[in-house]
Image (spheres, coloured by chain):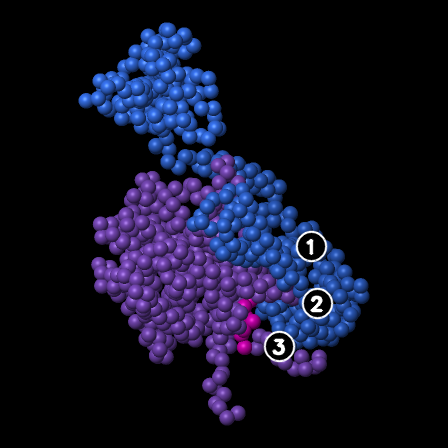
Chain colours: A purple, B blue
Amino acid sequence: MAFDSTYTRELPLVDSRSSFAEIDDTVLAPTERKPSKKWFVAFLMANTALLIGAICVGYTLYYGIGMWGNNNPVGWGFDIINFVFWIGIGHAGTLISAILFLFRQKWRTAIARFAEAMTIFAVMTAGIFPILHTGRPWLAGYLLPYPNQNALWVNFTSPLLWDVFAVSTYLTISFVFWGIGLIPDIALMRARAVSGIKKSIYAILSLGWKGSNRDWQNYERVYLILAGLSTPLVLSVHTIVSFDFAVSVIPGWHTTIFPPYFVAGAIFSGFGMVSTCLIILRKVYDMENIITLNHIEKMNKILLATGTMVGYAYGMEFFIAWYSGNPFESFVFINRAFGPYAWAYWIMIACNVGFPQLFWFKKIRRNIGITFVLVLLVNVGMWFERFVIIVTSLHRDFLPASWGMYIPTMYDLGILLGSFGLFFTLLLLFVKVMPSVSLAEIKAVVPGAQPTHHHHSEEH
Amino acid sequence: MLKKILKLDEDLAKDGPRSSKVHSVAALFDTPDEIIHAAAETSNAGYDKYDVYTPYPVHGMDAAMRMKETVIGKFAFLAGFTGVSLAVAMIGYMSGFDYKNIIGGKPFFNLPASIPIMFELTVLISGLFCVFGMLLLWNKLPQISNPLHDTNFMKYTSSTRFGVAIEASDAQFDVDKVKSFLAGVGGKDIEVVYYPEENIVPQTPIFNRQFIYTLILVAIVTALGTYGAIGKLVNILPFDWMHNQFKVNPQNTSTLFKDGRSMQRPVDGTVARGYMPYEYTGMPDSLVKLLSNPVPMDEKSITRGKKQYNTYCSPCHGYFGAGDSRLNGQFPNPPTLHSKKVREWADGNIYNVMTNGQNTMPSYAKQISRDDRWAIVNYIRVLQRAENAKDTDLP
């Protein structure tokens, strides 16, 4: 071999050749010991945010959505911004668990479980917003096509209905994907449990999984099929979310670049959130050997790639606005960059396109502190992206007489805070009660976990 | 209370007593190479009812155990096909047949717009059938009370080591032979697994009869409560403040009036607007002529009469009342309006013919208003005078 073999060598997926027992002990420690003070402080903070959100939702339900800043012409405000933001966060989990699985990216095993849990919690959080946005959430049943006494069926040509199907399918499939991944790990927790009550609970949740190879064979095939189904599903979900905008005739929304642009943005924002949470998790629970610096670096590379794709989309929107020769289109984009909401636009550009370019440098990719700051900025930037798309496209209507400004009320801000509260409350509970790394998957990629090849040659 | 819970916790943690009935003989192995070797040897020795237990799927194990390819992929395809068919049938029936709505001038069943939902349902049905099929049909789960659970063997195979268990139901099973066979292929910690004394399941308090009955009761109450609540909520009128106002609606009861009707009967003899009674129907001409013309003969009424005459009367009577119909004999031509009889008629007689009809001429009371009929009378008088003009009429 002429070239240096270290050049093509895969970086180790788990540091320091951890034994299976060590991996079990590390990953299951949070579920087996009493939570630390730090956990309680974090839980209290998340719960406070959740409570503030719940109060604001209560006001909204009692007095109606007049409590929000939505107005004419800006009919879509924080409600839809938050919906798109949270749905986007979910996409990283499915990308890690399904797409990277199909590409045989073994490093995904350390972060897949946690990212999948994030997907489910993010989609649950997102689902609240369109339902509140309808104004009468108790009538949300009419969103589904069921035979009702008014003899009405839903409009199957509306992107808003596609959303209902896409988001509920996405939540269901993500949930079963996550659920079957948990079964073998819960079976292990059952075998380890000291407490009898816990043992009974785990016995039921694991469905009596034995880990027999005849079971594994079907299990692995189903996992592969689910990965194959989830891959187009995750792409379809944000595509359909982008249709909510692209199918309309509003300048700034009515563009064909929206589906790929939204999907890239969703993965970008999702990886931002996964990184934010994992950096904290690995530190707090001493999982640095399992969620290694190599993982952080790989995620940073994906952030760089998707961030640049999003940057390309921003540029292409401006190019098309000029190239189409449509005066309304070019007005919207010039207004976006230099109009009254220019501050939001430049926050978006800086956080999504500017700062992630620092990830070109290996030193920065492998620096936890800088990475943490940058991924926080990505979260901020991606929230502002949705703000810019929705608010700036709406606030300048075709007629100057119908121009307006959008100013969120404290109820808008409270519900946004509450959505973070809900998400982190669920996440903290998950980390406490379930293994946040897939043990069955990570053990399979530990060096020496798979048979060497001489047995195969024996058979032939 | 706390003591009771702690006691329960301790009881549940204890392993139940085992009977003397053998379920299987199990052996542990330390490395993946060893277990692959052992699996291949067990298969070669002709054992049929055995399985390999590993904490994670080990590559090449299916081949070593000589297992057939799983058919779950085909099952997933069928489920996906069912999903897409279901979506086409649902959308086709609902929007193409049962509730046709024109949306953007597109066909009622709009295929391109249906593709997102067709795709989502394919994924949903395929994914769910696949997962639940794998768990329930192929892997026969949930099976919480397998005798292998709560053994030393299972403690290791779910976490750090690998194991083979040959079951007593195998045709060539013999405890001692199997033990020595497993030792021969390198098995360690060989263990005979017995069936539990009684099923573990009934011992667990969550399978306690009282608990299950309570659970069923709670489920029924919750289900009925939810059903009732949803039934109430879904039937709330979306915008009822416009429908229900503080006012009396017709056809409803009212507390204000003695007879309790919100809509009172009109006073006797009330004449509705535009419904003036006409009392001359069927009377001889000599009486009808007493009916006098309330519309004065002036330029305004003549102009109006001319317009209405040309619209309603002229097709049969001709523009100048000569009876020269433009209908090419579809109806018999009427007599001229310039006859002596008509000229000598009072205004009331002409009005009566228009109101009630005569011979083949139908009533025009529905088409022409009362005042317009009198205006037409005035115009007919103008035509008659013009046709029979005297020298003195000239200025």
Of A389 and B330, nearer the camera is B330
SS at badge 1 = strand
Residue flagged by tag 1: what amino acid is it?
Pro
Question: Label 2 vs label 1: CA separation?
Answer: 32 Å
- Mark 1 = which residue? B196
- Upstream in sequence: badge 2 or badge 1: 2
Locate the C terminus of chain A by quadrant. Answer: bottom right
**Which mark's residue is nearer the viewer, 2 or 1?**
2
Q: Is residue A445 magenta?
A: yes
Residue B68: mark: 2
| Residue drawn 53% across the image and 57% down it | B119
Number of marks drawn: 3
Residue flagged by tag 3: what amino acid is it?
Pro
Of B260 and A268, nearer the camera is B260
Q: Chain of mark 3?
A: A
Whether residue B308 is situated above or below residue B46 in the rendered picture: above
- Mark 3 = which residue? A451
Range shown magenta: A440-447
**Which mark's residue is nearer the viewer, 1 or 3?**
3
